[in-house]
Image: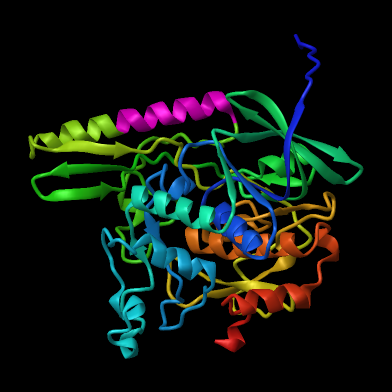
Amino acid sequence: MTISEKLETTVSESCDVLVCGGGFAGISAALAAARLGKRVTLLEKQYLLGGLGTAGLVTIYLPLCDGMGRQVSFGIAEELLRLSVSMGAEAGYPANWLDGSDPARRTQKDPRFRVQYNPSLFAILAERLLREAGVRILYGTWAAAVEKEADTITAVMVETVSGRRAIRTEAVVDATGDACVAYQAGAPTQVNRQGNLLAAWYYYLGENGYHLNALGFSDVAPEGAEDQNDVPPLTNRRFSGLDYGELSEMVQASHTSILEDIVKRRGHDRSLIPTSIATIPQLRMTRRILGEATLDDSQVHQYFPDSIGMVSDWRKRGPVYEVPFSTLYSSAVKNLITAGRCTSVTDPMWDIMRVIPCCAVTGQAAGTAAALCADFSRTDIPALQSLLQKNGVVLHERDL
């Protein structure tokens, strides 16, 4: 049975650039566009910024370096890392990178340029940073549909406590993590075929202090971690992350795993209490755009003339990838660009591109491009690259 409904949608406001999603990609995109003088509105369905990196408690800012002593991600990616520990790091402070105490030791044996940070502090600091840049933040608001004329989005329909509203905009940045706006707008998308393993990360306080318990592994164990094959999954079920009923079941399974783990740990430490649990599903790869180009993990150390920055492989030392601008958009929807974990990559590359530094690199590029032109198929690439370089980004590996 279907229900027909006519919705009268009020146009509540307008902006030059509408950023959908307030994770690290959305934060970076909004900052970049606002700093170039655009009127920017940022939508976030939760009530704090940071996405998985705060509400999801995945509070490990993975490397900005290649693990061989070279920094590869710069600009806002580095700015946000430094912001995350500006009031102190939780763990893994990379002194040789942040303090320059012994730069000569930045070798394959030295800790990488990564850190563990506090989620609450980062969320508040990022909010202040955006407000100072003039970004309008709308919490409790998410993109529900789009209005189009031909191949261009003219407005995004949002759901709020006030009901459905429309926001008119010149350009849209999809930083939802799930390519929600791209999907709604009819851009070509691809669903992750493998699905997501269950994770149940939480913080606790016990006799040995305050700790993050990364309960449940991602698909590939990071370098130096215990072999994935030696760690049984929390459940054999995988989750697509694109069905509301399934997501509810996933969150409940996560809560069950946390409670079981706490009970087990209390057998050794009666003082142990949980201090925070994730308030969103800990999803990693769900849906992405099919862009004008698609980046693959075999394209390591490859030069791209339209590169908008570089990223490394968080799982192992050595690989460096230039990120082509053409992986951020599809010409099917002229004024839509993606950032974060929903850019155009192959499945093997997805696990590399989904993490915080990569989200910040693509976010800065998307926001900068949105400030230049609302038809991304006509973007002046040299002008875009010049602005990125002016704002601290190194585009090509040969320039390191």
Q: Quadrant of residue 257?
A: top left
Residue 155 in picture, x, y percent from top left: 78, 39
Residue 47 in picture, x, y percent from top left: 47, 37
Q: What residue appears at the point 55 percent right and 54 percent down from the top-left corner?
A: 27
Q: What residue appears at the point 37 percent right and 33 percent down from the top-left corner?
A: 254
Residue 249 in picture, x, y percent from top left: 46, 25
The reply, left or right, for residue 292 in relation to residue 28 is right
Q: Quadrant of residue 93?
A: bottom left
Quadrant position of the C terminus in the picture: bottom right
Q: Quadrant of residue 176?
A: top right
The reply, left or right, for residue 279 in relation to residue 192 is left
The reply, left or right, for residue 255 in relation to residue 26 is left
The reply, left or right, for residue 6 in relation to residue 387 is right
Q: Nearer the viewer, residue 265 or 310?
A: 310
Q: How is the image coloured?
A: rainbow
Instruction: State the extent of the magenta-drawn residues as a range.
Output: 243-257
Q: What residue appears at the point 64 percent right and 74 percent down from the top-left corner?
A: 388
User: Could one spot residue 322 in this view of the protein?
Assistant: no
Q: Compared with residue 349, is residue 274 higher up or lower down, i.e. above or below?
A: above
Q: Residue furthest bottom?
A: 104
Within the magenta stretch, is there residue 328?
A: no
Residue 80 in picture, x, y percent from top left: 46, 63
The main secondary structure of the magenta stretch is: helix
Q: Nearer the viewer, residue 332 or 318?
A: 332
User: Could one spot residue 72 in this view of the protein?
Assistant: yes
Within the magenta stretch, is there residue 255?
A: yes
